[in-house]
Image: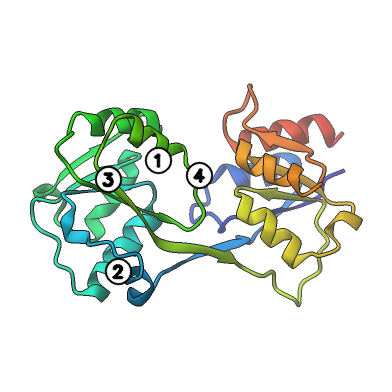
């Protein structure tokens, strides 16, 4: 019986979050604590990569984190972004977030309606003359790199932020029946926070194939891998699991 679940993400800001519906529907307690946090590189660390931001005519963002750290780093480096810089985002929500830093109406922005890299790269390929800058985390796969190379797009990939472990509070009991993970880095942080995790009777759920592989590589049993065919979201998958197993 699952009664208490640790979700390794920040607590939702809205009361209407599907997570809170799960609590009501299945009578479980959800605790939110991200196992990883993101911190930006210093200007000195970035300079070591020998990347010149102003050599590029377009910037590609895969997350809001990337936007925050790009503009913060530009400020620290005293780099003034030209008015004609173009921005490409993985989704509409991401490019809209740029409004926190620049006059959105004056910029040229592009995004993938589907939120998939394949579609964004197709859009980028229509702008072959651009020299793309791709800020990313220190933890990333080569999948996007291969897509950009296949389209022969001129681009520079650089690290602007890193993922680090975010420790659990030491004054609270580890009395969870299940932990939900979202990234391979979260798996590493879990084992750092709870070294004897394998000896505890705590079930694991995750979202995404990369996280599932990291769990399996760590020799841990995986109880639930989302998305499910009937539920494309982690909340939907979790709700289905509880419906079938909490009887």
Would you identify the image quadrant in which residue 229 lies? top right
**Rendering coords of residue 43 (x, y %):** 32, 74
Q: Is residue 148 left or right of residue 21?
A: left
Residue toward you, 105 or 71: 71
Q: State if disc 3 and disc 2 touch (CB < 8 Å).
A: no
Mark closest to the chain's N terminus, 2 or 1: 2
Residue highlighted by disc 2: 73
- Mark-to-mark CA distance, 2 and 3: 19 Å
List the residue tagged with mark 3: 155
Rounded to the nearest angstrom, the CA distance separating label 2 from label 1 is: 23 Å
- Which quadrant of the figure contains the C terminus? top right
- Please provide percent x and percent y for residue 63: 39, 50
**SS state under label 4:** loop
Residue assigned mark 1: 145
Q: Residue at x 71, y 30 (%)?
A: 240
Q: Are marks 2 and 4 in contact (CB under 8 Å)?
A: no
Left or right: 67 with respect to 86? right
Sequence-first disc among 2 and 4:
2
Left or right: 194 as drawn, with respect to 15: right
């Amino acid at each position: 019986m699952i009664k208490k679940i640790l979700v390794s993400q920040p607590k939702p800001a809205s009361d209407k979050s599907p997570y809170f519906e799960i609590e009501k529907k299945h009578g479980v307690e959800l605790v939110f604590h991200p196992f990883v946090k993101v911190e930006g590189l210093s200007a000195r660390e970035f300079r070591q990569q020998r990347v010149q931001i102003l050599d590029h005519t377009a910037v590609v963002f895969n997350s809001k984190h990337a936007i925050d750290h790009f503009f913060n780093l530009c400020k620290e480096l005293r780099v003034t972004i030209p008015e004609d810089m173009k921005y490409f985002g993985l989704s509409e929500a991401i490019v809209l977030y740029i409004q926190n830093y620049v006059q959105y109406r004056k910029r040229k922005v592009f995004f993938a309606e589907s939120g998939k890299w394949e579609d964004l790269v197709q859009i980028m390929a229509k702008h072959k003359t651009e020299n793309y800058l791709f800020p990313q985390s220190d933890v990333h796969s080569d999948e996007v790199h291969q897509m950009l190379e296949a389209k022969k797009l001129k681009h520079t990939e650089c690290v602007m932020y890193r993922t680090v472990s975010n420790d659990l509070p030491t004054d609270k009991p580890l009395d969870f029946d299940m932990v939900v993970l979202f990234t391979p880095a979260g798996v590493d942080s879990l084992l750092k926070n709870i070294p004897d995790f394998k000896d505890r009777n705590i079930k694991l759920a995750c979202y995404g194939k990369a996280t599932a592989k990291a769990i399996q590589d760590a020799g841990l049993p995986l109880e639930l891998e989302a998305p499910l065919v009937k539920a494309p979201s982690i909340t939907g998958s979790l709700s289905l699991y509880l419906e079938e197993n909490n009887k």
